[in-house]
Image (cartoon, grey):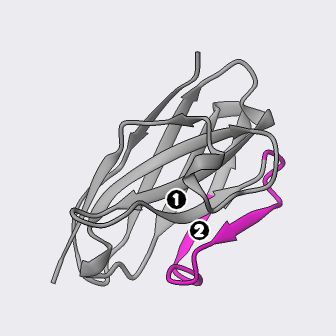
Amino acid sequence: QVQLVESGGGLVQAGGSLRLSCAASIRTSSMYTMGWFRQAPGKEREFVAGIGWIGSSTRYADSVKGRFTISRDNAKKSVYLQMNSLKPEETAMYYCAARAGGLPATSGGAYDYWGQGTQVTVSS
């Protein structure tokens, strides 16, 4: 059974930064491609960033390129999302997701496991 636990969310002013973490309880985390998604109230879930199991393959939503950075530490079975220059419209629940192998996918349906989410609130 794969479990993902997100942390690091909170309240931040516009222009500020947060670093989200996702701890995975899986046997061999290095074989999983990881992704971050977010969902704001009344809106559909959207892809934010993804990282391949080696770590060299990353993918970002156009809206976050240059501001967000996804990384992973396979030894710690963790993935991170550094978010800089946050905007109020990025207020959402942020979810970590995992899929067995493959390249980072932008569709949530491609991922097999999901965390419970961590709330990010950006004040104006």
What residue sits 60% from the left and 58% below the top? 107
- 6 horizontally vs 78: left or right: left
What residue sits 41% from the left and 40% below the top? 6
Q: Are marks 1 and 2 in contact (CB under 8 Å)?
A: yes
Q: Is residue 67 magenta?
A: yes
Question: Looking at the picture, does residue 10 appear above or below residue 102?
Answer: below
> Callout 2: helix, strand or loop?
strand
At which x and y percent is residue 38?
40, 60
Q: Which mark is residue 81?
A: 1
At which x and y percent is residue 116?
36, 36
What residue sits 80% from the left and 40% below the top? 101
Classify mark 1: residues with Cα within 10 Å, few (<14), some (14-19) or many (20+): many
Query: What's the magenta region?
Result: 53-70
Q: Which mark is residue 114?
A: none
Kindly indicate the quadrant of the structure image that contains residue 84: bottom left
Q: Residue furthest left?
A: 124
At which x and y percent is residue 18?
37, 63
Quadrant (top left, top right, bottom left, bottom right) of the N terminus: top right
> Callout 1: helix, strand or loop?
strand
Q: Nearer the viewer, residue 45 or 3?
A: 45
At which x and y percent is residue 65?
58, 82
Q: Main secondary structure of the magenta part?
A: loop
Classify mark 2: residues with Cα within 10 Å, few (<14), some (14-19) or many (20+): many
Measured Cα–Cα span from mark 1 to mark 2: 6 Å
Q: Amino acid at mark 2?
A: Thr
Q: What residue sits right under mark 2 in the picture?
A: 69
